[in-house]
Image (cartoon, helix red, strand yellow):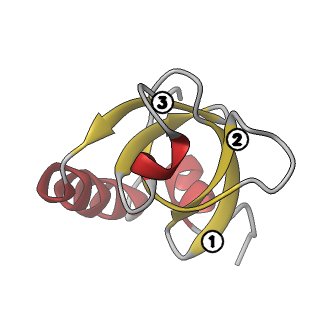
Amino acid sequence: MCIGIPGQIVALHEKQGDHAWAEVCGLRREVNIALVCEDEPEALLGCWVLIHVGFALSRLDEREARQTLAALHAMGEVETDVALFLRGGEER
């Protein structure tokens, strides 16, 4: 399944200028922000982005991000691979 997951940019990478840390479902993940960084990377702090295979593909408003996360959590009830991703790759 190929889906994008909303995440919030919480910190900039200390050594790579085109990378940042995003919080996704309670976990921090390193993401490449080159595709969504229009100005200074600091402007992305606190922004919601759609993440796929380690890349922030687009910006989302918070409402859209939360609705998407809610839908993904609902899918996790029936889709094993979605539930696995939302748990950070740990089988339970």
Please provide percent x and percent y for residue 36. Answer: 44, 28
The residue under label 3 is 37
Q: Is residue 27 above or below residue 50?
A: below
Q: Earlier in the sequence, mark 2 or mark 1?
A: 2
Instruction: Kindly report the distance in space between the C-alpha atoms of the residues bearing marks 1 and 3.
Output: 22 Å
- Residue drawn at x 70%, y 41% is 19
- Marker disc for residue 19: 2
The residue under label 1 is 27
- As drawn, the residue found furthest toward the right would be 15
Secondary structure state at the residue bearing disc 2: strand
Q: Is residue 88 above or below residue 6?
A: below
Q: Is residue 78 above or below residue 88?
A: above
- Marker disc for residue 43: none
Q: Residues within 10 Å of mark 3 (few under 14, many from 20)?
A: some
Quadrant into which the C terminus falls: bottom right
Say which of marks 2 and 1 sits in front: 2
Q: Earlier in the sequence, mark 3 or mark 2?
A: 2
Judging depth in this view, the residue of 30 and 24 nearest the camera is 30
- Residue drawn at x 25%, y 51% is 68
Contact between labelled residues 1 and 2, with CB atoms less than 8 Å apart: no
What amino acid is at disc 3?
Cys
Please provide percent x and percent y for residue 34. Answer: 59, 25
